[in-house]
Amino acid sequence: MSSPSTTPSSSASPQSAATGVERFGYQQELQRSLSFTDLLIYGLIFMVPIAPFGIFGSVFEGSGGMVALAYIIGMVAMAFTALSYAQMSKAFPMAGSVYTYAGRGIGAPVGFLAGWVILLDYILVPALLYLVASAAMASFVPVIPVWAWLIMFIVLNTAVNYFGIQMTARMNKIMLVAELIVLAIFLVVGVVALAQGKGHGDAFSPIFDSSTFSGPLVFGAVSVAVLSFLGFDGISMLAEESREDARKLGRAMVGALMLAGLLFITQTWVAALLAPNRAELLDKGGSMDSAFYDVAEYAGGHWLSVLTAVATAIAWGFANSLVAQAATSRLLFAMARDRLLPRFLGKIHPKHKVPINATFLTAVISLVLGLILVNSEDGIGQLSSLINFGAMTAFLALHVSVVVHYVVRKRSRDWWRHLIAPAIGFLILLYVVINAKVAAQAVGLTWLAIGVLILITFILMGRRPTLPDETEVSE
């Protein structure tokens, strides 16, 4: 397979030359403008600080009421993945995430398969977010149908992403402040309600309840809760748009994960203590989309229920889907740049410095999937399970790439960061993948099989995946 041009960009700044993509055989085409704070906010917005609002019922049921414990375990589990991301983003500070890390750390063919698998995650995430938000908004403003909300969200986000990463970063800051204000209001009202005696059960029941506790039960809930943590890895997609040292990319990922985890644990702890219908939640929480909003109404009244519900819809449909669309377009761009996807997806807008065709394609796919599933009884559930499976499977390749690159190739003796931590992360994710829904496993493995067939076709055609040579030794 032919390699991209290795001519350095004349517009590359000294900063980008020091930590950028030229040494890996690429041109610096995207605009380096994001600070560490921008990266951190991006990760938080991707994970949605109020994400538990929308899936509280499912996690409550799945964890036997120990919602906070599910998020604690989920945060610890994903922390090992964040550590592996930090190591690989330091070695290869480029867009593409797991595709780049597996391709550079193990080999280009493995990178293609890793990228193909994580496409299942990134391509479906925006569609899921648009669908959830549109259904929620239609419940509040029924005169506007779900499909119309879907179109409005997609058009708005595509327009923001079209005008460049700085526009996206500015919107991220505004949306993060808004989400944190809503969360603060809920927590203040919730704590006051607890002080007034509205709580149920022991204060520590959200992290341990002897009447319902079991290992399989809690780890089953983790597979649901972990969906809320997906997104910190999206920061790695912005490696070529960061003006910071490559090490700060990893720190932003770890920091975003930890901050989001603390917010998730705090809000679900308060909500679990206030749940007025505990028995019903334990019985059928997964089918109760309004579970958190019922808690909010019990704690503060109907106004708080409406506020938290509308905030969730806007956070998922605008803020989260905005950054998800941006991340997806960068993955498509990275793979197209290496000639593993159609070349037109690698086109950069000359003024706004964004992967323009990849951005539009992501919008079209989200629109088509959303319209197809808008009337499906379990469209949201199907997309969620597939996204989980795609992400977890790709993360397995990430952990392997850390070991191969550092221990096997570089002869590293930093056993904790380059062997033990990746191994623990690998085993945790393997457990989640093995225990995923059978339907998700079937579709996910079918998607992987298609990727294998495409790879074999490439090889038979004499287009074996290759990557430009690195001109300097990475750290």
Image: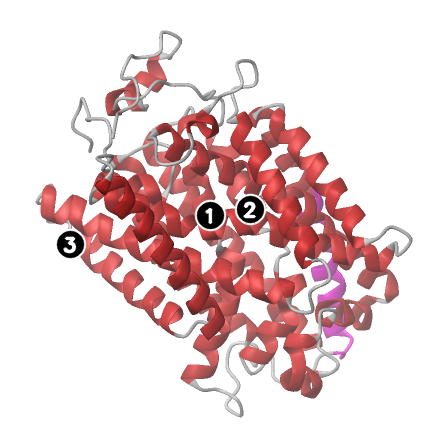
Q: Residue under label 2, please give it.
A: 46
Name the residue: 25% across, 58% down: 421
Q: Position of residue 47 (x, y in %)?
A: 55, 51
Q: Is residue 307 shown left or right of residue 273? A: right
For mark 1, give the secondary structure. helix
Using the rendered image of the protein, determine whether residue 430 is visible from the camera's viewpoint.
yes
Q: Which mark is residue 415?
A: 3
Magenta range:
178-198
Q: Residue under label 1, please give it.
A: 232
* First-in-chain label (3 vs 1): 1
254 magenta-colored: no
Quadrant, the N terminus:
top left
Q: Position of residue 351 (x, y in %)?
A: 56, 14
* Residues at circles 3 and 1 in contact by the CB criterion of under 8 Å: no
| In front of the other: 205 or 135 | 135
How many numbered discs sit on the rendered protein? 3
Using the rendered image of the protein, determine whether residue 231 is visible from the camera's viewpoint.
no
Q: Which mark is residue 103?
A: none
* First-in-chain label (2 vs 3): 2
* First-in-chain label (1 vs 2): 2
Q: Amino acid at mark 1?
A: Phe
For mark 3, give the secondary structure. helix
Q: Position of residue 436 (x, y in %)?
A: 44, 71
Measure how far apart labels 2 and 3 are at the Cα level: 31 Å
Q: Looking at the image, is 259 positioned above or below residue 294? A: above
* Residues at circles 1 and 2 in contact by the CB criterion of under 8 Å: yes
Label 3 crowd bin: few (<14), some (14–19), many (20+), radius 10 Å: few
Name the residue: 71% across, 36% down: 155
Which image quadrant is residue 65 in?
bottom right
Label 2 crowd bin: few (<14), some (14–19), many (20+), radius 10 Å: many
Which colour style is shown?
A: secondary structure
